[in-house]
Image (tube, rainbow, N blue to C red):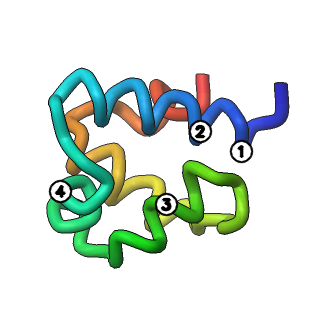
Amino acid sequence: MEIRQRLANNMRKFRREKGWSQEELAHQAGVHRTYISGVERLVRNPTITIVGRIADALGVPVGDLVD
């Protein structure tokens, strides 16, 4: 599986485990809701900085998002 697909799947999984909407994750990570949607739909290529912010918001190590 491609790394972007793993990232999208894991983001969605951790986000849902917290009971968060894309909007809540976006708020917690300091990005726009459409950006989170784009990453989950594989139309955005996030920088490592953004991946780090998303991981911090979800409370997981970056590696868990791409593993």
Q: Residue at x 58, y 68 (%)?
A: 47
- Look at the numbered discs 3 and 2 and tell me whether their residues touch, using CB distance below 8 Å: no
Taking the image as shown, residue 45 lies to the left or right of residue 15, namely right
The residue where tag 3 is placed is 37
The residue where tag 1 is placed is 4
The residue where tag 2 is placed is 7
Horizontal and vertical percent for residue 62? 44, 38
Query: Mark 2: which secondary structure?
Result: helix
- Look at the numbered discs 1 and 2 and tell me whether their residues touch, using CB distance below 8 Å: yes
Crowdedness near tag 1: few (<14), some (14–19) or many (≥20) residues, C-alpha within 10 Å:
some
Q: Residue at x 33, y 28 (%)?
A: 14
Amino acid type indicated by mark 2:
Leu
- Look at the numbered discs 4 and 2 and tell me whether their residues touch, using CB distance below 8 Å: no
The residue where tag 4 is placed is 24
Query: Mark 4: which secondary structure?
Result: helix
On screen, residue 6 above or below 57: above
Counting the numbered discs, the total is 4
The quadrant of the image that shows the C terminus is: top right
Q: Earlier in the sequence, mark 3 or mark 1?
A: 1
Q: Residue at x 20, y 35 (%)?
A: 59
